[in-house]
Image (cartoon, rainbow, N blue to C red):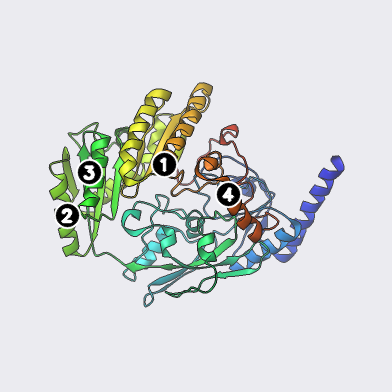
Amino acid sequence: MASEAKRSTQHSANALRALRRRLPGRVAVDKASRLKASLDNLRISFEPQAVIRVEQAAEAGQVLEVANKYAVPVTARGAGSSATGSAAPVRGGWVLDLSALQEVRIDPLSRMATVGAGVVTADLQAKAEKHGLFYPPDPSSKKYSTIGGNIACNAGGMRCVKYGVTRDYVVSLEGFFADGQPAGLGLPLKKYVSGFNLRDLWIGAEGMLGVVTSATLRLIALPPKRWAGLFAFRTERAALRAVTGLLKAGVQPSILEFLDRQSVACAENYSGYAMYPGHAGASLLLIELDGSAAEVRSQRSALLGYLEDRALGWKEARTEVQAEKLWQVRRTCSQSMYSLADTKLNEDVVVPLNRQAELIAFTLDLKKKIGLPTPTYGHAGDGNLHVHIMYNRKNADEAKRAREGIFRLMEKVVALGGVITGEHGIGLAKVPFMQLQHSEAEMAAMQAVKKALDPKGILNPGKVFEPFEVWDHPSLDVRLPWDHR
């Protein structure tokens, strides 16, 4: 046993020496670098052997070539903002830091942008706007999450109801296969049907099938006009009935957000801002319209015509500053929930639009049964609701009830014809629920694809397929750059 461990240590040392010869100055093994790269927003730490911060795309291929030769696990990393542990190096090995790949090239004629994997989403949006163009995907992490990470998890956001998710804007990808061979998945063209669609296979695969170093993304014309309104409802059911009614009436919002009463209370207490004065304890819909001035006027008229008699009250943002205030309160909902307890199980489930009211009724009943807060908000226009169970980490009884509650929630979601994750991906946190969602045949098919593209299993190992009990691994009480609390 001791000799086997010694051989393993020697093997790892040989791999690291080989990598340093190939990429001098790129490899960090100091404690601070390894600790920083050991976790993501799930905050469960697995310390890697080394962190490699590449500065050119080709260097990523060299890292993979050496890693594949020595069978060293490699976990690609952007900002490390994954909510599920997708970027945590659970098998140790090397962390491949792509955050320095920052190139942005915008082609206004073709309405495309070619960007490095390390480009921050909001930075791309700002650069596109200078050309009168728009990159719609807007996860709440857009001010710090990277395009590479967005592609790895097929990120969504508030605008999905009208504009779709990251996959809908990826034209082509460049990167490397597990053995370091270059991969060009598609070309920056509007039409491309040559061979299998490996591009879409990589999107949402959480870095398990290959490493993306750059992407060409589709842009659209920047909507010239926006309008935002806030609508209060007596109950969650009334708010969600209004959602289906609006969509049936032909209203096409660019954002349609739902907040239950628990979430509203958290956000208001945290921000000190009453979202709807005079209607304390109401469930809310935050709605944005965009388009030409004529389109926005027409949509606003249809929206108000439907909601005026159904809502307790409403108000509109008359300036960009007022509109941003509404959205900022919504964006801080997640962090504000820590006023309820010190630990959060954050789920991003999706159910059919006509089953959302059933899901909310279930979460309110679940709150009573497990005796823990279940604040819920989310993208009601596409059925993607963020259900949270709040508990105190050091309270064993609360932790047990929270775990039971999450399993009940996931069983209900699948029974409603929904999916266990719509934006965050599987990573480590959702592994326990995969068998609820997928048949043995489906799991076997996914594993066969993984085996074909990564025969040695070096790319982000320990995720999706392998058993992982997230509750057995305590999260660290650390402050990350995006924390508001």
Decide if residue 169 is on the left or right side of residue 176: left
Decide if residue 371 is on the left or right side of residue 260: right
Label 1 amino acid?
Answer: His
Question: Which quadrant: the C terminus?
Answer: top left
Residue 300 bears which disc, if any? Answer: 2
What residue do we see at 41% from left, 26% from top? 372
Q: Which of marks 2 and 1 is nearer the N terminus?
A: 2
Tell me the CA gap for discs 2 and 3: 15 Å
Decide if residue 148 is on the left or right side of residue 58: left
Task: Point out the frontmost of discs 2 and 3.
Answer: 3
Helix, strand or loop under label 1: loop
Question: Which residue, given by chain and number where applicable, does mark 1 sit on?
Answer: 484
Tell me the CA gap for discs 1 and 3: 32 Å
**Local crowd at mark 3 within 10 Å, few (<14), some, or many (≥20)?**
some
Helix, strand or loop under label 3: helix
Q: Earlier in the sequence, mark 4 or mark 1?
A: 4
What residue do we see at 62% from left, 49% from top? 33
Residue 242 bears which disc, if any? Answer: 3
Question: Which residue, given by chain and number where applicable, does mark 4 sit on?
Answer: 441
What residue do we see at 44% from left, 54% from top? 155
Give the answer, above or below, for where 189 lies relative to 320.
Answer: below
Label 3 amino acid?
Answer: Ala
Tell me the CA gap for discs 2 and 4: 47 Å
Label 2 amino acid?
Answer: Arg
What residue do we see at 67% from left, 46% from top? 91
Helix, strand or loop under label 4: helix
Question: Residue 213, how many percent across, how many down?
Answer: 55, 64
Q: In front here: 405 or 10?
A: 405
Q: Earlier in the sequence, mark 4 or mark 3?
A: 3
